[in-house]
C-alpha cells in the first residue's frame, strides 16, 4: 500500500508539470473562463433552457470568487491573453497560472510556478515581455477592471 502511494506521488508533481492520468488531456481554465461558463449557465437557466435550480451555496461562492479574482472581464481579452502563452511554449497549467496569479515579473512567475524556473530555454526577457503585454491587456480591456 505504501509503495503504491509513493509511486503515485512520483507520478504527480506540479513543480515538474506532472499530473495524474486523468489530467493528461484536461484544459486548465482561467478564472475568467470559469466566470464566462457560470454566467452562460445562469443565462440558460433564466431563459428556461436549464432546470430552474436555485444556485447552490458552492456555486454562489464560486461566482463571488471569480468576480473577485478574475483578472479579465470580456471574452475578447480572455482570448487575447490565452494567445500570449501558446501551448508550444507553456503547458496548460503554466499558462493558466501565469494569468490567474497575475504575475508581474519573470522572477515572481518563476517563484510561484517552479516548473518555469526549471526550464533553461525560457528566456527571462521574453517571459517579462509577455507578462507586460498581459498587464496592458488587463488595463485596457473593454470592461475595465
Image (cartoon, grey):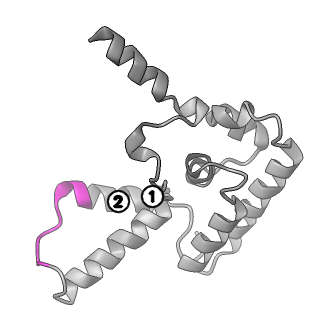
In the image: residue 33, left or right of residue 65:
right
Which quarter of the figure is the N terminus placed in?
A: top left
> Secondary structure under badge 1?
helix
What crowding class fits label 1: few (fewer than 14 Cα within 10 Å), some (14-19), or many (20 or more)? few
In the image: residue 28, left or right of residue 105:
left
Quarter of image, res 88:
bottom right
Q: Which residue is mark 1?
A: 68
In the image: residue 83, left or right of residue 23:
right
- Residue at the farthest bottom position: 47
Quarter of image, res 5:
top left
Q: CA distance from mark 2 to mark 1?
A: 6 Å
- Residue at the farthest top position: 2
Question: What residue appears at the point 33 percent right and 62 percent down from the top-left corner?
Answer: 63
- Residue at the farthest right position: 125
Residue 44 inside the magenta-drawn segment: no
Question: What residue appears at the point 86 percent right and 43 percent down from the top-left corner?
Answer: 123
Q: Main secondary structure of the magenta part?
A: loop
- Along the line of sight, which residue is nearer the eye, 15 or 127? 15
The disc placed on residue 50 is: none
Residue 112 drawn at (x, y percent): 62, 35
Which quarter of the figure is the C terminus placed in?
A: bottom right
> Secondary structure under badge 2?
helix
Residue 53 drawn at (x, y percent): 11, 72
Residue 133 drawn at (x, y percent): 77, 63
Q: Is the residue 136 above or below the residue 18 in the image?
A: below
- Along the line of sight, which residue is nearer the eye, 75 or 141? 75
Mark 2 and mark 1 residues within 8 Å of each other at the beta carbon: yes
The disc placed on residue 64 is: 2
Q: Is the residue 37 above or below the residue 48 in the image?
A: above
Residue 44 drawn at (x, y percent): 25, 83
Give the residues drawn in magenta, as a range.
51-59
Amino acid at each position: 500500500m505504501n509503495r503504491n502511494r509513493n509511486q503515485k506521488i512520483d507520478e504527480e508533481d506540479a513543480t515538474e508539470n506532472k499530473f495524474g492520468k486523468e489530467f493528461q488531456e484536461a484544459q486548465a481554465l482561467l478564472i475568467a473562463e470559469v466566470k464566462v461558463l457560470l454566467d452562460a449557465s445562469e443565462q440558460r437557466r433564466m431563459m428556461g433552457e436549464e432546470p430552474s435550480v436555485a444556485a447552490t451555496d458552492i456555486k454562489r461562492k464560486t461566482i463571488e470568487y471569480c468576480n473577485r479574482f478574475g483578472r479579465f472581464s470580456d471574452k475578447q481579452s480572455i482570448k487575447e491573453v490565452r494567445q500570449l502563452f501558446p501551448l508550444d511554449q507553456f503547458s496548460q497549467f503554466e499558462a493558466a497560472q501565469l494569468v490567474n496569479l497575475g504575475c508581474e515579473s519573470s522572477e515572481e512567475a518563476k517563484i510561484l510556478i517552479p516548473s518555469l524556473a526549471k526550464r533553461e530555454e525560457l528566456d527571462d526577457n521574453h517571459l517579462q515581455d509577455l507578462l507586460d503585454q498581459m498587464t496592458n491587456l488587463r488595463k485596457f480591456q473593454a470592461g475595465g477592471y
